[in-house]
């Protein structure tokens, strides 16, 4: 345990705990007239940020610690979201526009006669939860298994992950896929019987997200602190050497990849009921790349940096797209360039030098630019 | 000349002239059925004014002036043009102009237009122009009545051009199938063997139909057997040509892919730089076409050719700037390069949005690029696809020459193979880096010019091609230009072969998935580099 990290852990978990208590109070107990009142809109926005933070955590785990730059992680996020969305669609039941108790509206609209087989069971919440975990896990297992076994690394891996999410996006855009095509799923009514439009449900969803993020964080922390975590870091820094030492590099990479995909899937599943829509544009390659920039801005290989980056960049995005929509892409683009050029350790790297010596230099990624500069 | 025309007009009997004038006047209030009868009576007069009047009627250029119900031929059928020039159909003299509002066109329907086209084809049959005659014969093959057959026979006797002769023979053979003599029909079937027009196959197939009482439409068994054999032959040839057609389409799709990937093959393949802004450099090239066309709106035909060097310079300069300001600090760190250049791509996209708005811009296609070349009844090649294939081959060849035959190419290869040694030999590696990146970016700009003729020119143009471009380079083998060429073409052809069975989107998905799997199995692509270069990369 090192000072910066310990402090980072404490601050992050503290903030999460505080917000899990404060946010519901400010939203529910404080009257709307008060300046301290938190609107449901802001609450939902915060919940969305926390989902993104969980996704960023997943990316940091494989990129910052494993050296695997996935440009397709939004695919796992979206798959988790779609699994949850399928449950929410079935929950609508006969309250849809066409009033069909079994078929979701878009299937009635497309003149489908019966439910496709892969929709069976999604009327049960537990099946949906299982799928939220299982679908991203299986895809990551198959994809990662093939890729790592044939030692596809570095930019090649990045490019094929991007191709993967692109292919999935094209696939989900198709109406025949049975996932609502272009429009995806929306118009959800309730979850487990609780009305999604009620503030109280939203508060519960927010708290659940905060808890999920805290648990995910602790799990990642435990993983990177474990013996396996050290092997994974070693693979990042010198893959061949680890292999020659007798470790099964592929298995380590594969399992951390699968775990990361599951985290992303859970983040997606929490995201969908809060924003109330899931559609194929979530698979767009740019989304995955944006996640990477959150992590880079915050500081990769630190876990709390990823969370910090996700929250900050997304807050900036909300602010800019509202206030100066045309500036946002310039700002985001500049952020990419400046962070990679001048801030390879991210914002966390700006923490006082005294605390950074030792732990981060070992724990963070190697810093060729800094070394070259010297 | 004028005297000649007057003399011809004078030679037509005065009575016929009166009929012509009266019939034209009748067109004003006639029903569609009446108009058909009028058109037939008009052609029967043989008046020299019949052709211009009927052509005008077909083109919606025959109008009635509301003020005095006089009939005129106007200069254009385009309803947005006003005022228009008026021509008197009876004298064929220009009689001034009038605003469009005061004119009502004499309407036509599908049936009437069909009749008009056939009647006009009969005029064209004696045209001195070979193409016009061919088109006329083609039109007449659609409606082979007695008078048309008589005309075709007459034309056949004097026709000199082989292709027109052949077309007429097909028509006459089709007519002969209805003849009473079985031997004549057999000859006709023999003649139609291997003729690929759809009418021929339909007509032959009709011979094998059974009438409701169970007997064949064609009573003679020999003719039926010959027809069946001819149909089999035609079907075989059609299948062959459809394979050729698919191959051609596939190669043209592959050409686009190769073109898009060529610049990347330099920056990624030779330099090892992951340039995510590659798509946006192409986008700059496409917008260059737009700007060039704005600057020279009257010379659309050459605008694309002018845009080629301009786009090369624009995108090449942008590339050099990107290399000097960003990429050179990131050599050896491919993942960081990827992120930084992605940032550049976002900035470029937004820049284009700010300058040209987020909407797609209209880029015109020069006339010489549109159209088709019909090889035969079953195979026709669209010109723009043909050009893209030739253009890609041209760009590829020039690039090879630059790399293999010029000083810059020598430097580029030296630096990519052994940077330290090249430096020791006195090569300014930094300058070579910038030039190499500029070359790759410039080629991206040229690809953008070509893309502007195929897809929408908008801020998202680059994004939709970047993944394909990377896949082509990785598939072909990084650093291997020939591999890229083969890989891109193969992807295009496979895509085109799958498309009829799966639909366009699914075909694309399948190709992507196949590529992902392929890279898992052969991570270094179709044609991996071997030897020292491979170890270094």
Image (cartoon, coloured by chain):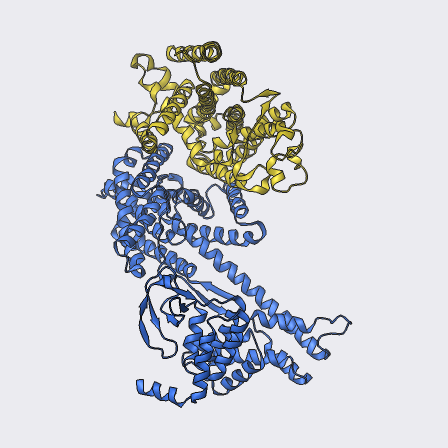
- The answer to which image quadrant residue A349 occupies is top left
- The answer to which image quadrant residue B297 occupies is bottom left
| Quadrant the C terminus of chain B occupies | top left
| Residue plotted at (41% across, 23% down) | A310
Q: Position of residue B180 (x, y in %)?
A: 68, 84
Q: Position of residue B146 (x, y in %)?
A: 58, 82
Q: Position of residue A177 (x, y in %)?
A: 59, 40
- The answer to which image quadrant residue B13 occupies is bottom left
Q: Nearer the viewer, residue B294 or B80?
A: B80
Which chain does the yellow colour mark? A
| Residue plotted at (57% across, 21% down) | A195
Residue found farthest to the front: B68
Q: Is residue B54 above or below residue A266?
A: below
| Quadrant the N terminus of chain B occupies | bottom left
| Residue plotted at (26% across, 42% down) | B320
Q: Position of residue A25 (x, y in %)?
A: 47, 10
* Chain B display color: blue
Tell me if A206 is positioned left or right of B363 in this view: right
Residue found farthest to the right: B213
Q: Nearer the viewer, residue B23 or A59?
A: B23
Q: Nearer the viewer, residue B173 or A72?
A: B173
Q: Is residue A348 above or below residue B72?
A: above
Q: Nearer the viewer, residue B524 or A278?
A: A278
């Amino acid at each position: 345990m090192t000072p910066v990290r310990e402090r980072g852990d404490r601050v992050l978990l503290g903030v999460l705990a505080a917000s899990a208590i404060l946010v519901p109070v400010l939203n529910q107990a404080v009257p709307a007239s008060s300046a301290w009142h938190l609107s449901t809109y802001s609450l939902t926005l915060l919940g969305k940020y926390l989902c993104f933070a969980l996704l960023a955590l997943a990316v940091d785990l494989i990129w910052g610690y494993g050296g695997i730059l996935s440009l397709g992680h939004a695919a796992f996020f979206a798959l988790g979201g779609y699994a949850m969305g399928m449950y929410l669609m079935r929950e609508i039941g006969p309250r849809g526009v066409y009033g069909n108790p079994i078929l979701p509206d878009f299937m009635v609209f497309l003149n489908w006669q019966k439910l496709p087989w892969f929709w069976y069971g999604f009327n049960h919440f537990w099946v949906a939860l299982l799928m939220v975990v299982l679908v991203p896990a299986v895809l990551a297992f198959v994809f990662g298994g093939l890729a790592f076994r044939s030692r596809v690394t570095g930019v090649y891996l990045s490019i094929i992950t991007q191709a993967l999410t692109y292919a999935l996006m094209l696939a989900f855009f198709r109406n025949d896929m049975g996932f609502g095509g272009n429009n995806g799923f929306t118009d959800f009514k309730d979850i487990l019987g609780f009305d999604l439009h009620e503030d109280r449900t939203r508060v519960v969803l927010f708290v659940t997200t905060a808890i999920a993020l805290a648990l995910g964080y602790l799990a990642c922390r435990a993983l990177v602190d474990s013996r396996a975590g050290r092997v994974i870091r070693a693979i990042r820094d010198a893959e061949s050497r680890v292999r020659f030492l007798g470790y099964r590099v592929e298995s380590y990479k594969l399992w951390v990849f699968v775990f990361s995909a599951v985290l992303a899937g859970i983040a997606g599943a929490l995201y969908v009921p809060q924003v109330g829509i899931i559609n194929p544009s979530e698979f767009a390659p740019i989304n995955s790349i944006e996640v990477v920039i959150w992590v880079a801005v915050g500081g990769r290989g630190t876990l709390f940096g990823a969370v910090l980056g996700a929250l900050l960049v997304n807050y900036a995005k909300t602010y800019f797209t509202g206030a100066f929509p045309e500036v946002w892409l310039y700002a985001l683009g500049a952020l990419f360039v400046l962070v990679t050029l001048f801030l390879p350790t991210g914002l966390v790297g700006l923490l006082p030098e005294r605390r950074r010596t030792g732990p981060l230099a070992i724990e963070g990624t190697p810093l060729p630019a800094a070394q070259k500069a010297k | 000349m004028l005297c000649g025309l007057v003399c011809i007009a004078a030679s037509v009997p005065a009575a016929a002239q009166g009929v012509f004038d009266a019939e034209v006047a009748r067109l004003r209030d006639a029903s569609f059925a009446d108009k058909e009868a009028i058109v037939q009576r008009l052609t029967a007069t043989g008046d020299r004014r019949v052709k211009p009047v009927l052509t005008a009627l077909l083109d919606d250029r025959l109008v009635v002036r509301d003020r005095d119900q006089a009939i005129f031929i106007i200069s254009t059928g385009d309803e947005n043009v006003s005022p228009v020039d008026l021509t008197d159909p009876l004298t064929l003299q220009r009689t001034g102009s009038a605003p469009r509002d005061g004119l009502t066109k004499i309407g036509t329907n599908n049936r009437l237009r069909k009749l008009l086209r056939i009647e006009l084809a009969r005029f064209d049959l004696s045209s001195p122009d070979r193409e016009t005659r061919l088109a006329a014969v083609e039109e007449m093959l659609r409606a082979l009545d007695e008078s048309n057959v008589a005309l075709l026979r007459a034309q056949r006797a004097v026709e000199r051009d082989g292709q027109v002769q052949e077309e007429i023979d097909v028509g006459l053979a089709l007519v002969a199938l209805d003849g009473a003599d079985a031997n004549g029909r057999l000859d006709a079937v023999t003649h139609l063997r291997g003729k690929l027009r759809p009418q021929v196959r339909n007509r032959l197939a009709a011979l094998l139909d059974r009438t409701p009482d169970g007997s064949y439409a064609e009573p003679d068994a020999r003719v039926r057997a010959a027809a069946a054999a001819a149909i089999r032959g035609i079907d075989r040839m059609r299948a062959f040509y459809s394979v050729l057609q698919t191959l051609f389409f596939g190669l043209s799709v592959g050409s686009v892919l190769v073109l898009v990937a060529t610049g990347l093959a330099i920056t990624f393949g030779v330099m090892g730089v992951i340039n995510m802004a590659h798509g946006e450099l192409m986008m700059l090239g496409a917008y260059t076409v737009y700007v060039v066309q704005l600057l020279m709106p009257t010379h659309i035909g050459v605008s694309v050719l002018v845009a080629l060097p301009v786009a090369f310079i624009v995108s090449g300069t942008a590339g050099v700037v990107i290399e000097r300001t960003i990429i050179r600090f990131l050599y050896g760190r491919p993942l960081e390069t990827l992120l930084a250049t992605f940032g550049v791509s976002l900035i470029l996209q937004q820049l284009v949005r700010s300058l040209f708005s987020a909407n797609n811009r209209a880029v015109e296609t020069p006339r010489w690029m549109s159209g088709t070349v019909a090889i035969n009844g079953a195979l026709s090649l669209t010109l723009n696809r043909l050009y893209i294939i030739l253009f890609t081959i041209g760009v590829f060849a020039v690039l090879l020459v630059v790399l293999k035959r010029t000083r810059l190419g020598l430097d580029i290869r030296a630096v990519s193979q052994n940077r330290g040694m090249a430096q020791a030999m006195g090569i300014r590696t930094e300058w070579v880096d910038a030039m190499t990146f500029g070359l790759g970016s410039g080629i991206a700009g040229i690809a953008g010019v070509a893309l502007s003729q195929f897809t929408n020119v908008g801020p998202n143009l680059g994004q939709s091609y970047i993944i394909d471009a990377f896949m082509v380079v990785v598939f072909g083998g990084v650093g291997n230009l020939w591999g890229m060429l083969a890989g891109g073409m193969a992807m295009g052809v496979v895509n085109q072969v799958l498309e009829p069975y799966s639909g366009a989107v699914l075909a694309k998905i399948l190709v992507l998935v196949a590529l992902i799997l392929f890279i898992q199995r052969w991570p270094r692509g179709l044609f991996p580099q071997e030897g020292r270069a491979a170890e270094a990369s």
